[in-house]
Amino acid sequence: ELSIAGGWQDQYAAAFGGFNLMQFKKTGNTVIPLRIKQDILNELSANLILFYTGIKRDGPEIHVHQRKSMLEGKEDVILALKQLKKNTSKIKDALLRGNMVEFGKLLHEAWENKKRVDPRVSSGRIDTLYTTGIRNGAIGGKILGAGGGGHLLFFCPPLHRKDVQRALEKEG
């Protein structure tokens, strides 16, 4: 109604809560609750770290550019979006099976594909922060939301958590 470009995931996540697979289609949207065992949720919680990049983002501008690229049929963008969709299914399976290392690797793949959708998703500063996290023990991660700033989420085994924290704090 306000004509502000953006995704729907945040609103659906707030409305439904929990872990869900969300499918957005022209014909209608579907939310499928994922029944993840408590021990898997505990392990996931122990392996995730959230960092603020210090960069204010402009999500609507990124969404407008992504939509334009998609409507223009830019091949690399379409391919990256298809890969993100396939990746979502693999992430769901890794979570349900409790394969946390695979989850971390798939998070990294999702990040690489998200950057291919629009170069504004990342920046030199974000790339430096991400690389710092990976070099210090994180298995994977990604920027949250539209990108361009905001928060980085890392999947990091507890053994390397302090190393990642210290290295990113050093980066500011």
Image (cartoon, helix red, strand yellow):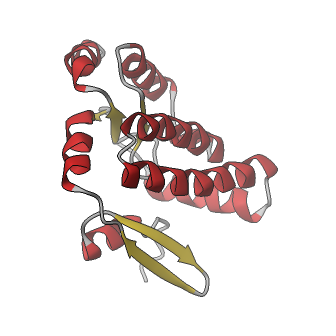
From this view, report whether residue 25 is shown above or below residue 110. below
Q: Quadrant of residue 153?
A: top left
User: Which residue: 57% across, 45% down?
Assistant: 114
User: Where's residue 91, x and y in %?
Assistant: 47, 50
Give left or right: position of 73 versus 108: right
Closer to the camera, 133 or 147? 133
Q: Nearer the viewer, residue 32 or 82?
A: 32
Q: In which quarter of the image is residue 165?
A: top left
Residue 89, position as x, y percentages in the image = 53, 57
Disc tally is 0
* Left/right of residue 144 with respect to residue 35 in the rendered view: right
Q: Which of 93 and 155 is in front in this view?
A: 93
Image quadrant for the C terminus? top left
Residue 55 shows in the view: no
Tell me residue 5's x, y (percent): 50, 67
Query: Farthest bottom residue?
Result: 27
Q: Residue at x 27, y 43 (%)?
A: 44
66 and 35: which is toward the camera: 35
Q: Which residue is drawn at 25% across and 14% down?
A: 163
